[in-house]
Amino acid sequence: MKKRIFQSDRRFQVWQYTVSHGQLLIRSTKEGGHETQVDVLFKNVRALNIPVTFDGLAIERDQSMGGDSFDVSGEKWAGTIIAGAVAWDETSAEHFEESRLLSLSQPPAARGRPEP
């Protein structure tokens, strides 16, 4: 059974992949008259089959695969990401600012802030 969990008609691109943590960040910047930036983060990525730049993004969780398979698609493309989790965030951040999603996944000292 598939369940749609995210959908946007904006232009996205693969922004960052971190091998050591298996994290894939996909970003839609403020271009095209948008006032916000959208980040989508997949964690514990084990496989992916997506273009590097694409228009539109729909994410469906394929629960028949134990919840680790996400069918992703957009305008004139479709693919799959095998990952442990996905999260997204829409902010007013600027083009090259670090995603809050990545900041939340690191310990405070790794972000350059003192631990409480």
Image (spheres, grey):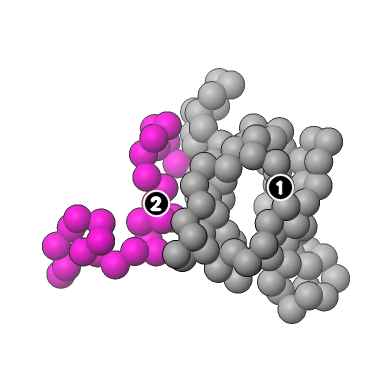
Q: Which numbered disc, 2 or 1, marks the residue that appears first in the sequence?
A: 1
* Rendered-image quadrant of the C terminus: bottom left
Spot the residue most to the front. Answer: 19
Spot the residue most to the bottom. Answer: 66
Left or right of 17 on screen, residue 65: right
Please name the residue shown 49% across and 47% down the image.
Answer: 16
The magenta stretch spans residue 92: yes
Position of 14 relative to 36 (above/below)? below
Task: In this rendered view, identify the residue nearer to me: 5 or 15.
Answer: 15
Q: Which residues are magenta?
A: 91-116
Q: Read off the residue under disc 1.
A: 50
Image mark count: 2
Residue 100 circle label: 2
Please name the residue shown 69% across and 71% down the image.
Answer: 68
Q: Position of residue 84 (x, y in %)?
A: 60, 71
Left or right of 73 on screen, residue 6: left
Please name the residue shown 78% across and 63% down the image.
Answer: 3
Q: Within 10 angstroms of label 2, few (less than 14), some, or many (20 or more) residues?
A: some
Please name the residue shown 18% across and 58% down the image.
Answer: 113
Mark toward the viewer: 2 or 1 = 1
The magenta stretch spans residue 98: yes
